[in-house]
Amino acid sequence: MVNTELRIKELCKEKGVTQAQLADRLGIQAVSFSQAIARNKFSIDRLADIADALDVEIPDLFKRNSDTITCPHCGKKIKIEKGE
C-alpha cells in the first residue's frame, strides 16, 4: 500500500469528475473509494487504475514539494521526471 499525500480530490475537481463517478469508473463502491481516499492508502495497481481513469500519469497523483517521492516499499527517494 502507498501511504503518501495524493491529489485525487484535486485532480477530480480539475477533470470535472466527482469521486463517485471515478469510483464507478474503477468498478468499486463510492463509499469504499471515499474511505480509501480518507485513509490515503492505495495499492500500486489501484494507483495505476486511478491514473488511467483520470487520464494522468501516476506521478501526477502525488503531491510534491520537490521532484522526488519516497518509495513505499524500500523508503528510497525516487526522482520524478515528467516527459512532455
Image (cartoon, helix red, strand yellow):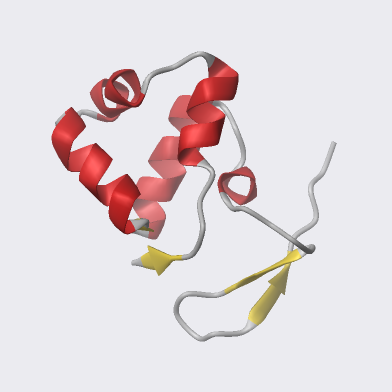
Residue 73 spot, x, y in % from top left: 45, 80
Residue 34 spot, x, y in % from top left: 26, 39
Quarter in which the C terminus is drawn: top right
Left or right: residue 77 versus residue 23 is right
Question: Is 48 or 75 nearer to us in this picture?
Answer: 75
Name which residue lies at 30% across and 57% down: 39
Question: Please, is residue 10 above or below residue 62 in the view?
Answer: above
Q: Quadrant of residue 25?
A: top left
Find the residue positioned furthest to the right: 84
Residue 5 visible in the current orientation? yes
Q: Quadrant of residue 18?
A: top left
Question: Please, is residue 51 above or below residue 45 in the view?
Answer: above
- Give the tally of numbered discs: 0
Name which residue lies at 27% across and 22% down: 20
Residue 28 visible in the current orientation? no
Find the residue positioned furthest to the front: 38
Left or right: residue 63 versus residue 68 is left
Quarter in which the N terminus is drawn: bottom left
Name which residue lies at 60% across and 33% down: 56
Question: Is 16 or 78 nearer to us in this picture?
Answer: 16
Residue 60 spot, x, y in % from top left: 63, 44
Left or right: residue 6 versus residue 78 is left
Name which residue lies at 63% across and 51% down: 59
